[in-house]
Image (cartoon, grey):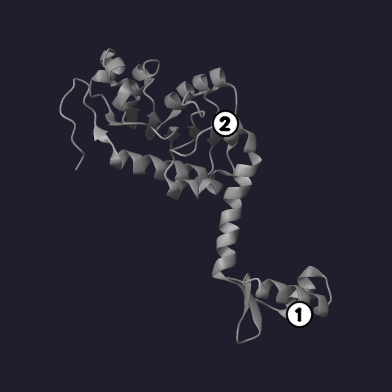
Amino acid sequence: MQSLKLNEVAKKMDITPTEAFRQLQRLTDAGLLEKTSEGRYRSTAYSRLILESSATLGFLSKHREYFRDHDASLIPPQFRVRFGELSKTVLLTEAVVNLNTSTEVFKNAEKRIDAMNEGHLKSNSQILKQQSMKGVKVRSLLQENMVDTLKEDPIVAERSWEKRTTPRVCAIVILTEKIVGIALPKLDGKMDYQVFEGTDPESMRWAGDLFEDQWNKARPWQPYGGPKTNPP
């Protein structure tokens, strides 16, 4: 953590020492800076928390129109406060294009596919099976009310890849080692498939942590109505 003396601050900001002192004193009084015994100024734990939070606020502000009619309340709080990690994602609004893109994302995966969605796998079930047979680690987290529909698809019903179910998915997440796509439901519960797409480490880490959290809380796949038990 960098700390600076008054004269160093004045030089960096190209202001007089008197003005630098005045500004530093204001920030110190506000609890954003602290003065060390060596006469150096440094940020406080409080100011660092403010800076971390500002990334999340910036992300939400940038996409205020989206969040006005999309439901983020199902996302666990510990992930909502990390929304700033999605700052480098791009919001893609064309639903048909996004659905077609998801198929290509599945095809291009080489190491892993983590997919959390309501359960609409029929169009991609063959691809997921093929990818799994090629050695790609495939995991699907599905919404429980879709199980009866999905078991009609013999490819989905078989155990070609790992599947678990949850009462309600908190978001649609598609994650590979290359890319992530995230979509939230609208306030009425319906999906419009507007997607936040990212390839940067921060957004992929956020999505990976969310998927892992939900996966660990989910139940084993029981396509034929077997007993539901929590995973070990």
The residue lying toward the viewer, choosing from 147 and 139, is: 147
- Depth order, front residue of 221/69: 69
Q: State the residue at coordinates (26%, 16%).
A: 151
Q: What numbered label is drawn on residue 60?
A: none
Q: Nearer the viewer, mark 1 or mark 2?
A: 2
- Picture residue at 47% right of the left edge, 39% below the top: 73
Residue at label 2?
69
Instruction: Specify which label sits upstream in the sequence, 1 or 2.
Output: 1
In the image, taking residue 188 as reference, residue 32 lies left or right, namely right
Is residue 129 shown above or below 64? above
Q: Residue furthest front?
A: 188
Residues 160 and 61: in front is 61
Report helix, strand or loop for mark 2: loop
Question: In the image, is residue 90 above or below residue 152?
Answer: below
Q: How many marks?
A: 2
Quadrant housing the N terminus: bottom right
- Percent x, y of residue 139: 32, 32
Direction from residue 77 to residue 94 in the image, left or right: right
Task: Name the amino acid, label 1.
Answer: Asn
In the figure, residue 15 lies in which quadrant? bottom right
The secondary element bearing badge 1 is classed as: helix
- In three-dimensional space, the C-alpha distance between marks 1 and 2, rounded to whole angstroms, equals 50 Å
Q: In the image, is residue 26 above or below residue 165?
A: below
Q: Badge 1, how many Cα within 10 Å: few under 14, some, many 20+? A: some
**Quadrant (top left/top right/bottom left/bottom right) for the C terminus:** top left
The furthest residue to the left: 227
Q: Where is residue 222 shown, x and y percent of the image?
A: 21, 26
Q: Nearer the viewer, residue 64 or 107?
A: 64
Query: Mark 1 sits on what residue?
Result: 7
Residue 120 location (% of width, % of height)? 39, 20
| Residue 5 point in image, percent of width and height | 70, 80
